[in-house]
């Protein structure tokens, strides 16, 4: 993403900057006050001023010394650059949505200049934007949607087949052999008729000989087809299995930002259905593809050698078929692409309802959700039906057009036989080659449908495989035994780079210190712990662990030293033992029991039917909320974490469960650097420090008593909760 465009000589002359003033940012904007689109318009930022150039004129100028605030504000499909001077807010520039990220960085960089920090804010390390489609790109990777170097579908599909070169060579050999056998058959039939049957020229042994050859060729063709089908089915299964494994692994390593932007049903479709379509293509289409192509090419050559006139007559219908197929190619692609999108919608809706069935039943919305699902299913069925009707009309029409050529060959070829210029065997041979030509041309005209299925599936798979994780180990990343010191330096982050959730955060946490994060919903508390867990990376600034950049610590090593207890506890389908051991798969049975006792979970586990081998059900629904939470605490304890994250760990629990969990947490937090979020502020009174986040910034820091004496934001929150309790 470019933050410093090259300005024309005319624009540089308009700036008239002195020699000691350097341009830091020069970015285009494209909307004027009336909402019309502009060109040759720039916002130029130096260490001293912001200059607005609009279509060859110097429209406005703001001295940074006069500015109180500079911000980029997103609107609907557009944005505003806002500058506050003298207590009044001015709209300095308007720009379309594609410039939102760019102006967000410029605004933050300009604000840094106001604070005397002249380290340029740049985005090259975190985000780039495709100049064609304006999609955000991680690192320096080329856009998979627009890159001409990618080679498109063919290169992507060949790269999938690359690991199976030897198998492909064997399959190609049998395909070629099948083509040779098929092409020989009409020649043998011609010899049988002309040399043996015509006017009874031959003998009975000669007839048996040719019939034996024809029989052997037929048996050989059956065997070759069986071998081809077996090899292609095996290759398709292996390819599908490998693609599923790669897709699953890729989804696992991709950043949460990618996962959160996609619907679960959509990703499941790509892992399950798209890989199955590739397998089906290999079994049903690929196993005959090269055989058909070889026969088609050599069939045309033989026909031209045998009779140029009849060959040209039969070829008349080939351009018609090709023109029709080409004319409907985009239509076919669009039709089946819409069909797969609707299929995604149906699967996503089904997955959502099944996951939230308790909520659906609680509100009595079964009929409403069934109606919504039926609407999606009906829409999918309608598109699917229309596609099948289209193909049912399109394909027979092509078959009829090409089939008409056989009748012309019989008419003109039969005339040649009657005139004595052609033998009956030669006519039969030519009719067989013509029928073969049209038969395989029919097969080729049906190929676009199969190819569109393949193209859509390969593109959807490659859309996931071409993604690069935003968070990866640096080349210099190494393991580190974490002590627990954490420091934020001028940290800024937003899930959308043009809309920061946290801005200019500065915080130092000592090893073993417990920090309570306080603030209204949406202020960035959970975002802060997501950054500490290294689920996301900062847009600007630094996050240090024991004085070392968090990106220089290997991800697996870092995550192995973190314990997490969240409000919405997630348990995997399986046993209690497996869920606790998830944090440390090689843990001994004694370690699991010790962790469960520390979490106050051992007693209730022993009361379950199968103890630690009790099946917890989907998402742990066989257990109560307090029981699930205590298993999550045991899971966190088992790993003996150096950094502990508690996100509403006691929310929505009954008094007894909360008491047991608080006792477990007090043991868990001892000697560990802990970040805790709780809306019940009374549970954070014993924290070493409380950090109050407001307006995307740290507003207050101190102990409970210090902040109460200050009577600021924290005091207001505590007072409001006390008043609410009195009312209740």
Image (cartoon, grey):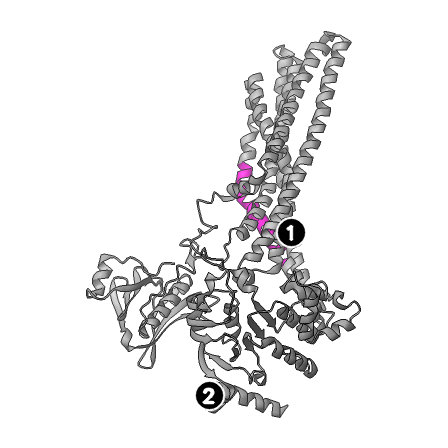
Q: Which residue is mark 2?
A: 712
Q: Nearer the viewer, residue 103 or 75?
A: 103
Q: Secondary structure at mark 2?
A: loop
Does residue 353 appear in the picture of this structure?
no
With 41 as the anchor, is 701 left or right in this view? right
Q: Main secondary structure of the magenta part?
A: helix
Examine the rendered structure and indicate whether residue 683 appears above or below residue 342.
below
The percent coordinates of residue 232 (x first, y second) are 65, 37
Does residue 698 appear in the picture of this structure?
yes
Mark 2: give few (<14), some (14-19) or many (20+) Cα within 10 Å.
Answer: few
The percent coordinates of residue 99 (x first, y second) are 39, 62
**Residue 334 on the magenta segment:** yes
Mark 1: give few (<14), some (14-19) or many (20+) Cα within 10 Å.
Answer: some
Residue drawn 48% across the image and 76% down it: 510
The percent coordinates of residue 418 (x first, y second) are 65, 12
**Residue 403 on the magenta segment:** no
Q: Nearer the viewer, residue 537 or 161?
A: 537
Q: Quadrant of the C terminus?
A: bottom right
With 241 as the anchor, is 672 left or right in this view? left
Residue drawn 66% across the image and 49% down it: 385
**Which residues, given as a range, are shown in magenta?**
323-346
Q: Secondary structure at mark 1?
A: helix
Q: Residue furthest bottom?
A: 726
Q: Which residue is mark 1?
A: 272
Residue drawn 66% across the image and 73% down it: 629
The percent coordinates of residue 276 (x first, y second) are 65, 47
Examine the rendered structure and indicate whether residue 169 appears above or below residue 577.
above
Residue 140 circle label: none
Q: Earlier in the sequence, mark 1 or mark 2?
A: 1
With 622 as the anchor, is 285 left or right in this view? left
With 156 as the anchor, is 200 left or right in this view? right
């Amino acid at each position: 993403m470019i933050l410093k465009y090259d300005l024309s000589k005319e624009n540089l002359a308009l700036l008239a900057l002195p020699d000691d003033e350097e341009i830091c940012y020069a970015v285009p904007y494209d909307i004027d006050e009336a909402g019309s689109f502009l060109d040759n318009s720039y916002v130029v930022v130096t260490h001293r001023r912001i200059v607005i150039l609009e279509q060859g004129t110097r429209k406005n100028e703001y001295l940074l010394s006069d500015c109180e605030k500079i911000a980029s504000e997103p609107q609907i499909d557009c944005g505003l650059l806002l500058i506050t001077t003298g207590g009044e807010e001015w709209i300095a520039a308007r720009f379309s949505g594609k410039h939102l990220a760019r102006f967000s960085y410029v605004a933050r960089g300009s604000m840094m200049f106001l604070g005397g920090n002249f380290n340029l804010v740049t985005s090259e390390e975190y985000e780039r934007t495709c100049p064609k489609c304006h999609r955000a790109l991680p690192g320096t990777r080329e856009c998979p949607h627009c890159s001409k170097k990618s080679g498109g579908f063919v290169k992507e599909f060949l790269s999938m087949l690359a690991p199976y070169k030897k198998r492909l060579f064997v399959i190609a050999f049998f395909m070629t052999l099948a083509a040779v056998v098929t092409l020989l058959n009409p020649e043998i039939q011609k010899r049988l008729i002309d040399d043996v049957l015509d006017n009874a020229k031959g003998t009975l042994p000669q007839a048996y000989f040719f019939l034996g050859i024809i029989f052997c060729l037929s048996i050989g063709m059956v065997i070759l087809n069986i071998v081809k089908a077996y090899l292609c089915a095996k290759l398709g299964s292996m390819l599908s299995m490998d693609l599923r494994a790669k897709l699953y692994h890729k989804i696992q390593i991709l950043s949460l930002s990618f996962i959160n932007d996609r619907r679960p049903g959509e990703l499941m479709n790509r892992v399950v259905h798209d890989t199955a379509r590739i397998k089906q293509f290999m079994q049903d289409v690929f196993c005959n593809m090269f055989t058909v192509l070889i026969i088609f090419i050599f069939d045309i050559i033989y026909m031209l050698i045998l009779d140029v006139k009849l060959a040209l007559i039969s070829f008349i219908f080939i351009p018609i078929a090709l023109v029709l197929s080409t004319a409907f190619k985009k239509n076919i692609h669009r039709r089946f692409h819409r069909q797969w999108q609707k299929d995604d919608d149906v699967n996503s809706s089904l997955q959502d309802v099944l996951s939230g069935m308790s909520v659906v039943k609680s509100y009595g919305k079964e009929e409403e959700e069934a109606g919504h699902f039926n609407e999606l299913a009906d829409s999918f069925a309608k598109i699917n039906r229309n596609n099948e009707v289209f193909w049912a009309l399109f394909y027979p029409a092509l078959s009829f057009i090409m089939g008409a050529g056989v009748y012309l060959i019989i008419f003109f070829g039969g005339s040649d036989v009657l005139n004595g210029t052609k033998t009956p065997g030669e006519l039969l041979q030519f009719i067989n080659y013509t029928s073969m030509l049209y038969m395989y041309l029919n097969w080729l005209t049906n190929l676009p449908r199969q190819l569109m299925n393949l193209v859509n599936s390969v593109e959807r798979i490659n859309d996931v495989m071409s993604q690069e994780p935003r968070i990866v180990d640096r080349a210099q990343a190494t393991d580190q035994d974490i002590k627990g010191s954490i420091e934020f330096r001028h940290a800024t982050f937003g899930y959308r780079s043009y809309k920061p959730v946290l801005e200019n955060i500065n915080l130092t946490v000592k090893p073993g210190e417990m920090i309570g994060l306080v603030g209204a919903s949406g202020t960035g508390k959970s975002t802060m712990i997501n950054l500490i867990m290294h689920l996301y990376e900062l847009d600007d600034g630094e996050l240090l662990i024991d004085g070392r950049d968090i990106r220089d610590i290997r991800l697996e090593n870092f995550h192995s030293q973190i314990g997490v207890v969240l409000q919405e506890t997630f348990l995997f389908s399986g046993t209690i033992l497996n869920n606790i051991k998830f944090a440390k798969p090689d843990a001994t049975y004694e370690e699991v029991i010790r962790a469960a006792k520390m979490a106050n979970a051992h007693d209730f586990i022993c009361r379950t039917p199968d103890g630690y081998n009790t099946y917890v059900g989907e998402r742990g629904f066989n257990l109560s909320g307090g029981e699930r939470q205590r298993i999550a605490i045991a899971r966190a304890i088992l790993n003996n974490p150096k950094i502990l994250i508690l996100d509403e760990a006691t929310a929505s629990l009954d008094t007894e469960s909360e008491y047991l969990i608080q006792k477990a947490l007090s043991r868990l937090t001892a000697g560990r650097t802990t970040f805790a979020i709780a809306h019940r502020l009374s549970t954070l009174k014993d924290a070493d420090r409380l950090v109050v986040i407001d307006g995307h910034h740290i507003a207050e820091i101190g102990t409970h008593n210090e902040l109460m004496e200050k009577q600021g934001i924290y005091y207001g929150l505590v007072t409001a909760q006390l008043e609410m309790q009195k009312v209740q």
